[in-house]
Image: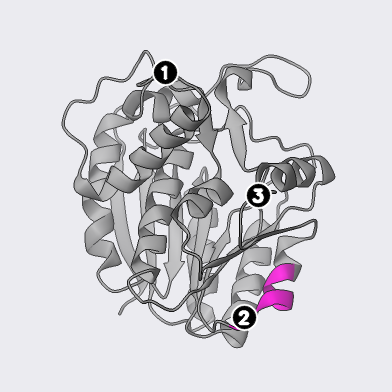
């Protein structure tokens, strides 16, 4: 794989994904019993935004100034309206990560990937299984979380992990499937993993991130999901530009199978606010649709 997340870290897609992930974790924590958080494509855990312009071979424009830079600090932060209360946990943990690493109050240099987001929220009874098959990224993740209780890092294919780690002893799980979408059959691999995961843990919460580049591919993926006859399944999308904008990645989405009760009501004001604050061109917006109704 050639994928490196450094120059994507903290972009609008990360903001949307991690804000929603925070609310999913909090929803599961409304019950005292612990749960397994399984991250199939965990990455390196945390990112230094000062390195975001450095790719594998060439320098490139970092994406975080148009994402977390607008709403979470940095020189371009200037929100139009106050953030909804549902975003408080997410914005707080970004600020606390920077403060813990010596960044002056209000500054922004570091950004948490999904493993650090969940590790910051996890209770003693919650357990993290973090899978990353690229050796260098996995080694960085293992070092990042070496002192984090309840976090297990594995160098393995995350799709295999769905089969290997479910059902968990806790009988409760939040599974994040967030691949880099470097291969043509990624949606098919996701659908197969969901089928296996739901067979093993029908009541598990499964969250799948996907890019909005070709609407036809996304709609075909939704059809494949419906063919699985899953439990209630919600699609949440954020577009920062309209369909005719020249940028390749105009938006992203998160499919949530078995969403917690009233998760859609929490998510809507978050997405609508993010669509306003993170817009890069006319024609974007927020969208919530039930692929399989409650």
The residue located at (23%, 25%) in the rendering is 79
The 10 Å Cα crowd at callout 1, few under 14, some 14 to 19, many 20 or more, is few
User: Where residue 25 appears, x then y in whole percent?
Assistant: 42, 62
Which comes before the other along the chain, label 1 or label 3? 1
Which comes before the other along the chain, label 2 or label 1? 1
Label 1: which secondary element: loop
| Residue identified by numbered label 1 | 104
The label number, if any, that marks residue 168 in the structure image: 2
Is 255 drawn above or below residue 80 in the view shown? below
Residue 231 visible? The answer is yes
The residue located at (30%, 58%) in the rendering is 288
Q: Nearer the viewer, residue 146 or 240?
A: 146
Decide whether residue 52 is among the magenta residues: no
Label 3: which secondary element: loop
**Labels 2 & 3 near each other (Cβ < 8 A):** no
Q: In which quarter of the image is the C terminus?
A: bottom left
């Amino acid at each position: 794989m050639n994928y490196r997340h450094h120059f994507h870290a903290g972009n609008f897609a990360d903001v949307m994904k991690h804000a929603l992930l925070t609310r999913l974790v909090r929803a599961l924590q409304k019950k005292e019993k612990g749960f397994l958080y399984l991250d199939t494509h965990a990455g390196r855990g945390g990112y230094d935004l000062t390195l975001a312009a450095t790719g594998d071979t060439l320098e490139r424009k970092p994406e975080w100034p148009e994402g977390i830079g607008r709403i979470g600090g940095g020189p371009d932060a200037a929100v139009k309206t106050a953030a909804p209360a549902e975003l408080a946990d997410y914005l707080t943990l970004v600020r606390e990560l920077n403060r813990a690493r010596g960044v002056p109050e209000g500054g922004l240099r570091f950004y948490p990937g999904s493993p650090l987001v969940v590790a910051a929220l996890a209770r003693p009874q919650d357990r993290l299984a973090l899978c990353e098959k690229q050796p260098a990224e996995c080694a960085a993740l293992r070092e990042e979380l070496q002192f984090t209780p309840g976090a297990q890092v594995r160098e393995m294919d995350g799709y295999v992990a769905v089969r290997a780690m479910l059902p968990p002893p806790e009988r409760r799980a939040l599974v994040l499937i967030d691949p880099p979408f470097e291969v043509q059959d990624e949606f098919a691999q996701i659908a197969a993993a969901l089928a296996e995961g739901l067979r093993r843990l029908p009541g598990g919460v499964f969250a799948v991130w996907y890019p909005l580049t070709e609407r036809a591919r996304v709609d075909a993926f939704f059809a494949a999901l419906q063919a699985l006859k899953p439990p209630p399944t919600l699609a949440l999308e954020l577009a920062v530009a309209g369909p005719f904008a020249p940028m390749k990645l105009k938006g992203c989405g998160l499919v949530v199978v078995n969403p917690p009760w009233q998760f859609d009501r929490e998510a809507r004001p978050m997405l609508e606010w993010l669509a306003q604050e993170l817009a890069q061109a006319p024609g974007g917006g927020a969208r919530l649709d039930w692929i399989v109704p409650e």
